[in-house]
Amino acid sequence: MSQPTPAAGNAAVAPPEVRPLLQVRDLAVDFKVPTKGSLRAASLRAVAGVNLDAMRGEILGVVGESGCGKSTTGRAILQLLKPSQGTVTFDGVELTTLPRGRMRAMRRRMQMIFQDPYASLNPRMTIGELIEEPLLVHSGATARERRARALETMDLVGLNARWHERYPHELSGGQRQRVGIARALVSNPDFIVADEPVSALDVSIQAQIVNLLESLQEDLGLTILFIAHDLAVVRHLCDRIAVMYLGTVVEIGDCETLYNQPQHPYTQALLSAVPIPDPLVETERRRRILVGDVPSPLSPPSGCRFRTRCWKAQEICATETPTLTSRNSGHQAACHFPETSAPAPQPTPADR
């Protein structure tokens, strides 16, 4: 007897493919820089071929030294700066070629929290006007609806409703940054770029803002690109971390793997610079001190951009540019000689 054919409704269905909310491919940003003795401006490549994926609902950290291109990358993703090359795909929509009208409509779903809570707020506008402004631009809500939504968002970020009519100069730095967060959230975005949102604040206020962002991400299901230079903050908040050096991503992986098993020499140097809470207890670490200064992006080194400061550099590093290569569990590093394991480095006599 022949076997019965299964009904179409009972056929096995393949699970849907998990697609990143944000995909960045080969992103580059150039700036024109005037040069002495020449009428032609030099081209400075601040971001050089960045590749990133941000999954829906995760916090992706971007770290690196000042001037490495972190903030420029965030602004280029939101199209606040026009990329020189590459693609930025948000929820299946390519942003770099999007007409201005459609890009303006997309901005409701993509917002930014700026680094400076003083300069990012118009001193001539009240707190209520600042928070309601995105609704005025992106929605057809009435004045009463805008006010109600602004008050609701103020409560969400811990701002007193009585401050609705105050001006920015009447608030503290931490309160001003909460206004910036409320302004980013008021239009119910899916994706937020947080550009060093705690670096201009006192340490105690930093902890409050970080905890606020963490709770908002959990409650609202936000996807956040968190740009920072404080590795302790990034470890506490982020799911995955991308490390940038001189305009490129040199390593990316989940938080615990990257901290416990860094594969790129630059990542190792960054992590070794993190202050030790109790030096008497934690002595199993050797300080990696980088020699020399960061090269100028006007004339970056050939091959690996980190080779001029790397203690592992060899001839191939000067001739071939390393690419991000998966090593284990999605952990990627752009290095010709990555660490294959991460034994705790023993302290040298100088360290003692």
Image (spheres, rainbow, N blue to C red):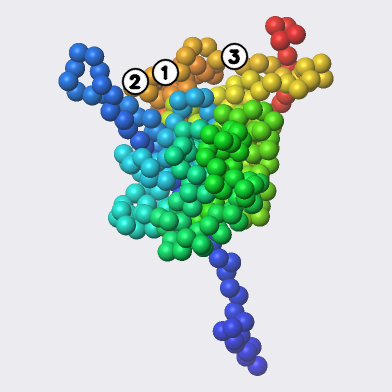
The residue depicted at 25 percent of the width and 18 percent of the height is: 35
- The residue under label 3 is which amino acid type? Ile
* Mark count: 3
- 306 sits to left or right of 5: left
Estimate the spatial distance between the alpha carbons at disc 2 and disc 1, rounded to whole Å: 7 Å
Estimate the spatial distance between the alpha carbons at disc 2 and disc 3, rounded to whole Å: 23 Å
- The residue under label 2 is which amino acid type? Ser
Residue with the mark numbered 2: 299
- Residue contact between numbered discs 2 and 1, judged by CB atoms under 8 Å: yes
The residue depicted at 42 percent of the width and 44 percent of the height is: 77
Query: Against 32, is 5 above or below?
Result: below
Query: Against 173, is 12 above or below?
Result: below
Q: Residues within 10 Å of mark 3 (few under 14, many from 20)?
A: few
Estimate the spatial distance between the alpha carbons at disc 3 and disc 1, rounded to whole Å: 16 Å
Q: Quadrant of the N terminus?
A: bottom right
* Label number found at residue 295: 1
Q: Is residue 341 visible?
A: no
Query: Against 258, is 1 above or below?
Result: below
Q: Is residue 294 visible?
A: yes
Residue with the mark numbered 3: 289
The foreground one among 101 and 153 is: 153
